[in-house]
Image: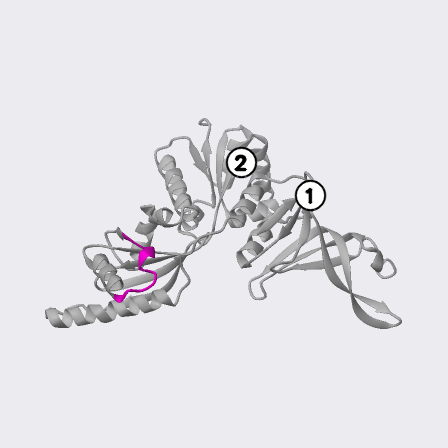
Amino acid sequence: MRYKWLTRDCMRIIPENFEDLICLSKIISEGDKVRAWTTRKVKIWNETTKIKVNLLIEVEKVLFSDFTHELRVTGKILEFSKNAERFISVGKYHTITIKENTCFELTKKKWSSFDLELLERARKRIPKVLVVSLDEDNCCIAKTDRYCLKIVKEISSNLHGKHNMEGRDEILRKYFSEIVRTIEEQEFERVIIAGPGFVKEDLKKYIDEKEVGWKNKVIVKDISIGGSVGLMEVLRRGYISIAARSYDIEKQIRLVEELMRRIARDENATYGINEVLKACEYGAVSSLIILESLYVKGKRQENKKVAKILELVENTKGKIVVIYDNSEAGKQLKAIGGVGAFLRFKIC
């Protein structure tokens, strides 16, 4: 994502990829103003045609499409370029479609700390990391993004019960060959190979012997169990941060687990919309931990209690941390109502 401040409350933005559009769908809210070049159907001499026009609209609705990779922003027209004077009037509705590399201007009455954090994350380049979690029986290969670990492929060695050493070695070579082939089908900048025992070193040795061009991108780490179950341990141990410091997912897991620990010990923490709102009214919230879906509903005034929580936390200089719904941390947070808070002091 590229962006530039034009005034104190307005910036020019150019989304560069699919994730940037997802990011913007969380930032653009009802009441914001969006200006962009767009096309609009008009009637000229009783014939309908499309003209290119620069419009400023006040946002009423934001819709993101996974299928078309488009962000559709709908609202009332406030201003239009001179070439449209005969065809367009203020107050009519229009939808501006934002795609990759669409240049537009966004004006907000107030930019929240989380809005700015999202933009900064999107601006940073995120390295691509593959995680290979394996033992002698199973291997799970996953790729990382800002939201979660996404499983690419699971591979079975079919080694179970093979005691003959010669046959065992041949099966392992075929196992490693399929793993390497799957790795080479992906785009990556680092590969984490993690597993128990010696199998991870055996795979690394196989890779070195193959003289693949990416062998120096491999990091070998120890975990207690391989396969898909081992992915969580890779996150917990901070191995992804070693490979790519800019990822959020490990921090989110540690943060939610710390929240759970404090709640269990009845320390300075609370959870649930009503309890968190009560804490906010006392000015007690130092950090708000909230699911992405709830945050968006609050920003768009679809959930009045959440909207009030966000307003109070901002006003009392609290920190807002948004947890992605489909991450491991998000699943844990959802189980306690989707929102929790670290407190400056305990309340009755």
| In the image, residue 67 lies in the stretch drawn in magenta | no
| Residue 286 screen position, x and y as percent | 49, 31
Residue position for label 1: 6
Is residue 301 visible in this depiction of the protein? no
Residue position for label 2: 277
Q: Is residue 143 above or below residue 293?
A: below
| Residue 262 screen position, x and y as percent | 37, 35
Picture quadrant of residue 252: top left
Residue located at (26% from left, 66% from top): 210
Residue located at (41% from left, 30% from top): 268
Q: Looking at the image, tell me whether mark 1 or mark 2 is earlier in sequence order.
A: 1
Task: Determine the secondary structure under disc 2.
Answer: helix
| Residue 258 screen position, x and y as percent | 37, 38
Is residue 105 visible in this depiction of the protein? yes
How crowded pointer 2 is (Cα within 10 Å; few <14, some 14-19, many 20+) is rated as many
| In the image, residue 214 lies in the stretch drawn in magenta | yes
Picture quadrant of residue 179: bottom left
Task: Determine the secondary structure under disc 1.
Answer: loop
Q: Is residue 44 left or right of residue 315?
A: right
**Residue that protrudes farthest toward the left in the picture:** 164
Picture quadrant of residue 336: top left
Magenta residues, start to end: 210-220
Amino acid type shown at disc 1? Leu
